[in-house]
Every structure is written in structure tokens, then in C-alpha cells.
Amino acid sequence: MNLILIGSSGAGKGTQIDHLITSFGLVHFSPGNLFRQQIKKRTALGFIAQKYIGRGDLVPDEVVDAMLEEWLGLTDPGLGIVFDGFPRTTEQAEFLDKLFKEVSRSLTTVIYLKASEAVILKRLTGQRACSLCNDHFNEESDPFTTCLYNKCLGEHLHALDDKSDIIRTRLQVFQGEIKPLLSYYGAQGKLVTVDAECSVEEVQKAITNALKASKP
């Protein structure tokens, strides 16, 4: 089983990826994680990636593709993969199709966690973190009640992202970027849209049902 999970910040992608890894024994591919590993190991690709990241630029497709190809060659072929943050473009999607064909893998499905701007704004502006223990809360779905470590009464909580105009801009950029990608996988018949405004459990169930219905 190999799948791609697409979703903006606040759509609950991280929670669902953790569930997929635990429930289906998948390995997680994230370009961001891979960049950090390559930079830490001081590899040639890591140096190239660091140059772009340091300038605040996107790492070019050819660098990301090279890292993916190397990573995939080191991954147990018997393990399924959940892709997070890749592919980002149709060019990367085409590269993944080509690479999978070369290594005798196939893409099972593409899950798009869809949520409205209003819901994303509510979730992201409600996020809080404790500067003392780094626990995370949400004023709407998981509010602070008592400190698990008996260290405070909530006085160390701070907002993680409460600037609505910045969040809206990010969402607009995200929607513009994924539109061609959704069309690409929709044309292949592999795209499944899941209502990310539902509860965590309902989203998990919808994803599980979509995977069961997909052909390996």
C-alpha cells in the first residue's frame, strides 16, 4: 500500500499520518524531514538543499527527486509508504509515477483532506502551546484544563498562529499549488476527497474505507 496524503495546515494531516503509520505499518516520506537528515549528515544533496532553504527558497524538483530516489532505494520494498508534502507539483507526480514503475511499486490512492477556510482559521487561531513543557492545546477541540505535570495553571500558554490574514494567504497559495495535482490524480481515478471537518475518528474511518476500496 502506497498513498499520498494532501491537506493544508489545520486539516489534521499529522494526526491521520500517525494513525496510518501505526495501523497499516507504513513508513513516512516527508521532504522536510529528509532535508534535515541530509543536512545533518552533511551530504552533497544536503548542502544543496541547505543553500536554498537558507535563502527561503523552495528546493528545486531535481534535488528533491534525487533525495527521494536515494531514500526509496534504501527502503524495504515490502513496506508501504505514506507521502506527506510530496509530490508538490505535477512534474514531481510524473517523476514519482516513473520511479514507482522502475521499482515495481504502485500508488494505491491519493487522499485529499478538505476543509473550508473558516474551519481552518478557527483551528489554527485557536492553537496554544505551553512554553514551559511544550504541550499543545486548542481552545476549541482540546482546551487546557489542568497541567499534566502540575507545573502551572496555564499562565505559560501562548498562541502558535493567530494572524488570520497570514493564514488566509497561506491557504490561497496552498489551494493554487494543489489544484493541478488534484486534477492529475483525479484523471487517474486515484483521488479520494475526505471531509476533514469531521471528527478525528470519522476522518480515520473514511480514509480506512477508501483504502479498502482501492485496488493495490
Image (tube, rainbow, N blue to C red):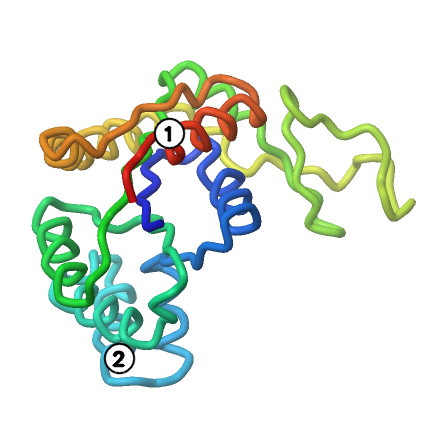
Residue 146 position (above or below residue 216): above
Q: Which residue is mark 2?
A: 47
Q: Residue at x 38, y 35 (%)?
A: 211
- The x and y percentages for residue 15 are 53, 39
Tell which of 66 and 134 is nearer to you.
66
- The nearer-to-camera label among 2 and 1 is 1
**Which corner quadrant of the image does residue 66 belong to?**
bottom left
- SS for dot 1: helix
Query: Residue 157's image quarter?
Result: top right
Mark 1 is surrounded, within 10 Å at the Cα level, by few (under 14), some (14 to 19) or many (20 or more) other residues, namely: some
In the image, is 200 to the left or to the right of 106?
Answer: right
In the rendered image, residue 83, in percent from the top left (x then y), is placed at 33, 51
Q: Are marks 2 and 1 in contact (CB under 8 Å)?
A: no
**Amino acid type, callout 2:** Phe
- Tag 2's secondary structure? helix
The residue shown at (26%, 79%) is: 47
Nearest the viewer among 208 and 204 is 208
Residue 173 drawn at (x, y percent): 22, 33
The residue carrying pointer 2 sits among few (fewer than 14), some (14 to 19) or many (20 or more) residues within 10 Å by Cα, namely some
Q: Quadrant of residue 159?
A: top right
Q: Which residue is mark 1?
A: 210
Inspect the image, locate mark 1, and give the three-letter code of the amino acid beneath it: Ala
